[in-house]
Image (tube, rainbow, N blue to C red):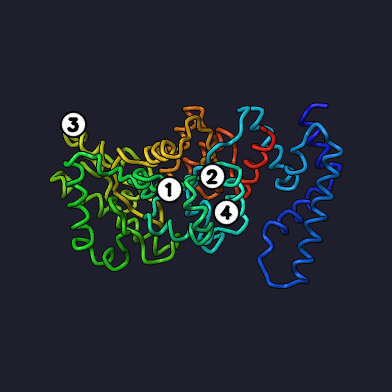
Amino acid sequence: MQRYDRLYALYDDFDADTLRAYQDFVDLFPPVDSRVALDYWESASDELDDRKDEIRSSFPDEPAFADVAARATRDQAFAALDLHAKYERGVNVLVLDVDETLRSAGGTDNEIPRETLHLLTEFHEAGVPIVICTGQTLENVKGFLSQGLGDELVHSGDVSIVYEAGTGVFTPGHGPDTKQLLYEDLGEDVRGVFDDLRSKVLPDAPETVRRGCHLQGNEFNVTLKPNFETGSERARELIDEALVYELDLLADCLDAPEQAVRAYYADADPEIAGVLEAAGETPDADVPDDLRDVLDRIDVAYYEADAAEIASRELNKVVGVEAAFDVLGVADPFALVMGDSKSDLRVMEWVHGEGAGIAAAPEHASERVLEHVQQTDELVFDRGAADEILRTAWALNLLAE
């Protein structure tokens, strides 16, 4: 019998939904000081073991099937088998965005769900390193990771944080390589522009931007965030205005024509072009070669109703992930990359081009991200349900063993 046929038989002949419910109960049962509760947990654990043993006896040549059925739905299991048939290997490192990926303002109340946190600990215990790859500040990420996963896991030496979209990498437990400030390797000319931007961005801002936005506490990037709920109409209006302002401020810091700077970034990013057009600021100017050479090194990013950011194009999540892999000793990566934004797309395209991984995105990800994911392995998950893809990857690894 072919492996696909055996997998069909597994889900047809056994109550995988109930098995998975027992597994989730055993995994997620909170620690309580109650003899009755403990007896109930032990009874569920025994029932789980009995059901798994029954599957193992029915599929002696497929020792992973019992654990696959206990973790993955039918669709997730077949997706995992498809991935194994295509790539013939399992995932050996996770590269995970946080906001609107592991957690969602609209789906998880901005908390990483317990199911997702538990699966991350399972991957960690199985020896799979975790790279958190985010645009957030280091201190913010360290805080919620320690709270959700525990200090022991975060400082195990197998977890790395690529923060501010690649300006720095923090990998506890690695001596002098624990914290790498990648922006220190940039030329003084570019670093000077960012110093100038940071000193002016709030004092010179229009009153609506100054009152409605705050400057994220980055070490290097210049990021304006709204003082309103991410995704709200008010946040969208403010970030659109902040984007136009940041483009013009960049022009001022470079002593360059505003229209030329607007034209450069509008040509590079359709979303930026759309914001400028909606504001009646449609750029129409030539970009001199000497200015283009400078702008080629500076990235302006627009995240609808979330952030307007100026960063170094020489520093991005790909650079940060490569540095994290070096520290973690991941020499032959096959990564699961999960994200929702253009900065995540760069990592997805990089691993795809290198044959070094697969990509997944939430259903509300940016259009370009969804297009890439649909064209590769179609790993799209529901808002706030990152565990769907983690279960698929877990099943993939079981099948690949």
Q: Is residue 394 left or right of residue 274?
A: right
Residue 284, percent across and down?
A: 24, 41
* Residue position for label 2: 361
In the rendered image, is residue 31 in sight?
yes
Residue 110, percent across and down?
A: 51, 62
For marks 2 and 3, the one nearer the N-term is 3
Three-letter residue code for mark 3: Asp
How crowded is the residue under tag 1: few (<14 C-alpha within 10 Å), some, or many (20+)?
A: some
Q: Quadrant of residue 174?
A: top left
Q: Secondary structure at mark 2?
A: strand
For marks 1 and 3, the one nearer the N-term is 1
The C terminus lies in quadrant: top right
How crowded is the residue under tag 4: few (<14 C-alpha within 10 Å), some, or many (20+)?
A: many
Above or below residue 197? Residue 322 is above
For marks 3 and 4, the one nearer the N-term is 3
Q: Secondary structure at mark 1?
A: loop
Residue 90, percent across and down?
A: 61, 34
